[in-house]
Amino acid sequence: ARCFGSKGFVPFTDCSASDICWLKTARLDSIEWIFNTGGNFGFQFQTVYLSVTYFDGFLSKRSIDDGKLWAIRLLSVACLSLAAKMEECKVPALSEFQVQDYNFESKVIRRMELLVLNTLEWKLGSITPFAYLHYFINKFCAESRPKGLFSDAI
Amino acid sequence: MENYCFLKPLGEGSFGVVWKALHKVTGEIVAIKQLRNEVSRLTSWEEFLQMAEVESLSQLKNHPNIVNLKQAFMGFDGTASLVFEFMEGNLLQFMQLHKKRFNEAQIRNVCHQILLGLDHMHKNGWCHRDLKPENLLVKQGVVKIGDLGSAKKIQPGIPFKDYVTTRWYRAPEVLLGSRFYDSKVDMWAVGVILAEMFNLRPLLPGNNAEEQLFWICSVLGSPTMKSWPEGQLLAGRVEYQFPQFPGFGLSFCIPSASESAIQLITSLLSWDPAKRPTAAEALKHPFFVGSHRIPRAIPRAIPERHHHILPNIGGILV
């Protein structure tokens, strides 16, 4: 399920070398935080996945330069909370999102959520591979639907 | 030198005089420090270039938090004149003019800048050795470390000879005559200055070396074999006995400081120099990385990219 490893990831091709390096590490750090926090809240896997696509989508349009760790952390929180609002039935309060080193007030998180929404032009209903999984599983294993195949696939 | 018109003296010390001066051609206002020839006693150009203040500043060029040496002149009589950018004042004047307390954000900002400058100095192998509010220059919200006249290149194994720093900011190992002190003496001074910014008065105002140690013991509590083993040795060597105090504690002495500020000052004012953080470590302290550093205008801090780049979704999916 951990498909976000550093190996297959070559995203930001036209930034300076040190910038990429910092951003790469910070991104991996954030993804780890999103996974762990999403897991602790008991979110579905697609919620976590969706937050990462928001995160990457945001960074493709706006740049967070070296050293602005607060911005990376705040972005992680905003992406996870937005994805939760899209996918989950029960959404935790903003004050429940805890990150290392920082103590973000709810109003700061809300301001960041708005910036993410505007940057992504409010297109939050991204279609992820999860949308097709059930279909393909039904198609390929119409007769015998082995239990747990869905979770194996992810 | 004849290009400068001396306007008025800004300050005088044992080293000589600092003048506010005007460059006649460019109109630029500068500060010129003229060293007394008993102080500089230069006989050659090489000696001039090796003067701590000249050598250190030429190696530490262009850091925003270290005062900028523009030019240096040597007179025929062996005097030296150093031309610096003009700064509005120093932190001591700044504190004296400020009637009410600084808020923690202001203190954090000043301290952050001092540590950035100090980190640059230490990483380049220089130890300031005379940090105090008078030597921290201020101009339009920017703080720069100045007066590098006592600075010394740190060379491992080679002891420092002299007794440095103004007493109130002097680290205990220096007070006890250690000859193997290092850049951590600057970190001690930062701790004392930080406390002073909260209280607007000196934290440890001893009148002589012994009284100075007495003050330190009364605030921090006397050092023990466990908290500073080396200290017992140093004290033994000069036949000094620490007065026994439990210590008032820093949170008692600096009541307006937040918990994280007290934590930082506590670590900077560790008896044992090895336990004090380096400038780089201090910059990572929670005092500096809380939610306070989030600017009000988030979108401005995270600008749009000029060339949009596409995240490699294929790469992410694998």
Image (tube, coloured by chain):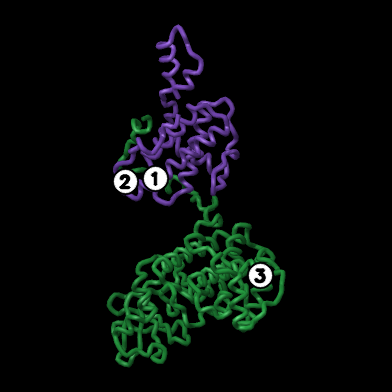
* Chain ID, purple in image: A
In the picture of the structure, the residue carrying the numbered disc 3 is B224
Residue B293 x/y as whole percent: 51, 53
Compared to A78, does B83 lie above or below? below
Residues B210 and B305: in front is: B210
Tell me the kind of residue under disc 1.
Leu
Check the residue under mark 3 and report the chain it is in.
Answer: B
The residue at 71%/72% (across/down) is B245
Tell me the kind of residue under disc 2.
Cys
Compared to B258, does B3 lie above or below? below
Q: Residues within 10 Å of mark 2 (few under 14, many from 20)?
A: few
Check the residue under mark 2 and report the chain it is in.
Answer: A
Q: In the displayed structure, does residue B253 sit left or right of residue A12?
A: right
Q: In the displayed structure, does residue B22 sit left or right of residue A122?
A: left
Which secondary structure, mark 2?
loop
Number of marks: 3
Q: Residues within 10 Å of mark 1 (few under 14, many from 20)?
A: many
In the picture of the structure, the residue carrying the numbered disc 2 is A15
**Residue positioned most to the left:** B25
Separation (CA) of disc 2 from disc 3? 53 Å
* Chain ID, green in image: B
Residue A63 x/y as whole percent: 38, 44
- Could you say which quadrant of the image residue B318 lies in? top left
In the picture of the structure, the residue carrying the numbered disc 1 is A23
